[in-house]
Every structure is written in structure tokens, then in C-alpha cells.
Amino acid sequence: MIHAVKHHPALELLEQYIEASLAPELSLAIAAHLDLCPHCQRIKMDLEAEAGTALASLPEAQTAETDWQQMLDFITAQPEIAAKMEKRQPFALQIQNSEILLPASLKPLLQNKLKWFNLGGISTAKLAGEDQHNVSLLYIRKDSEVPQHTHLGLEITLVLKGKIYDESGCYGEGDLLINTPDHTHTPRTMSEDCLCLSVLTAPLKFKKGLTRLLNPLQHLFY
């Protein structure tokens, strides 16, 4: 049964994505979500159409509209350009002994062999990012739990395969979770493994018992 995506980025985030005003890591998460979510694809198309209409209404744009359309028609008529503009297809990658289909937006970051860091039932592989900003794949085996934590910045999680649960609900393939310093949660899996894309703008802060010892060591696995 195909999972219906229920958790989406806010309209403001989609607008910023179209304007190319988001940080690269955030844009990546939005792009990957769009690859998986027909609902947000339609909203994106509507926003782009509105932006085009607004641009065409400007006096400067009206005088050049015909030339612009002719140039656009010429570019999109070229076979290699037209092929690139077709719907991007997911690609298969071997992860933790399973072949998993991933969004096309992630392909540029997955050209090299992944280096996994394992901690109990959780494995992470860092993809990109500098200093406090990073992008990782997070693989959580069934019946496993990420220790309770809050956030010093944004934590954006896109479910790529399986399901993950926390105190607020259940999230499946394509669902996008955005947590802020106001959120504390304990993500966990149940009867199946789960693969997520994780984007952090600042470290997590583990809250309970011995897991607090992980706080200064996060650069090793997030």
C-alpha cells in the first residue's frame, strides 16, 4: 500500500525554495520532499505560475515577452535540455543490505561510498555540511529508539523508507518533519526499519541519563 504523504513544508518554505533564498541544506530537504510528494509538486507549479504572471505584468517584461517565449521554446526544443526537464526518476542504492529507491535530488550527494557510524540500532552516514550544518542519512532498525532530545536549531527529517513514530504521531515515506528548539521528542521505529534524510542547523541536545554524555560527541555521528 502506497503511503499518502501527510506532513508537508509550510507554504512560506516552498516560496523561499522557489526564490532560491533557502540555505543549501534546507533546499535539499525540500527538493527531496518534492520528489516524493505530488501534492507539493502541484503547489510548486502554481506558485511558479503566479510568479511568472507577476513578472509578465511588469512593463519591462511586456516589451520582451515575445522574445523571451521564443528563446524558451528554442531551449526546451533541444533534446538534451528537454530530457533534463522531464520528471526526475528515483534511483536505487544499496543501504544496510537492502536496495532502496531514493529521490533524484539526493543522487549528487551519493556518488561515493557511504561511511556509516553505528550506535546500537541506529546508523548514520554524513553526506554534506560544514560546522554546525550537516546532512545525513539516518537508518533506524526496527524496534529501536533515538534517545529523547530537544534541538538547538532546526532539525528537518524526511522519511525515505519505512515509518518512524514520536510523541506527535506516525510518519511515513515522503513525510517532512520540522522540529525547533521548542520541540522535545523520542523518535522510534516499530515493526520495520526506517531510513531518513536528516538536516541539522545546530546540534541536538539529549535530555536523559547517560545519553547526555553524547552531547559533546555529536560531530562523530551527526
Image (cartoon, rainbow, N blue to C red):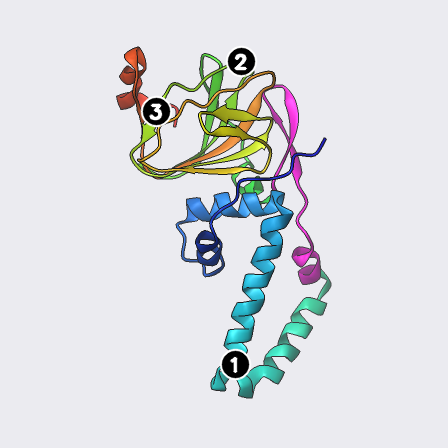
As measured in the structure, the alpha-carbon distance from the residue carrying label 2 to the one carrying label 3 is 18 Å
Reading the image, the residue beneath label 1 is 57
Q: Nearer the viewer, residue 125 or 173?
A: 173
Q: Residues within 10 Å of mark 3 (few under 14, many from 20)?
A: many
Q: Is residue 95 above or below residue 41?
A: above
Q: Earlier in the sequence, mark 1 or mark 2?
A: 1
Reading the image, the residue beneath label 2 is 143
Q: Is 140 one of the magenta-colored residues?
A: no
Q: Is residue 32 above or below residue 173?
A: below
Reading the image, the residue beneath label 3 is 149
Q: Earlier in the sequence, mark 2 or mark 3?
A: 2
**Residue under the point 46% across and 29% down:** 168
| Three-letter code, disc 1 | Ser
Image: magenta residue range: 80-103
- In percent of width and height, residue 166 lies at 46, 25
Q: Is 100 one of the magenta-colored residues?
A: yes
Q: Residues within 10 Å of mark 2 (few under 14, many from 20)?
A: few
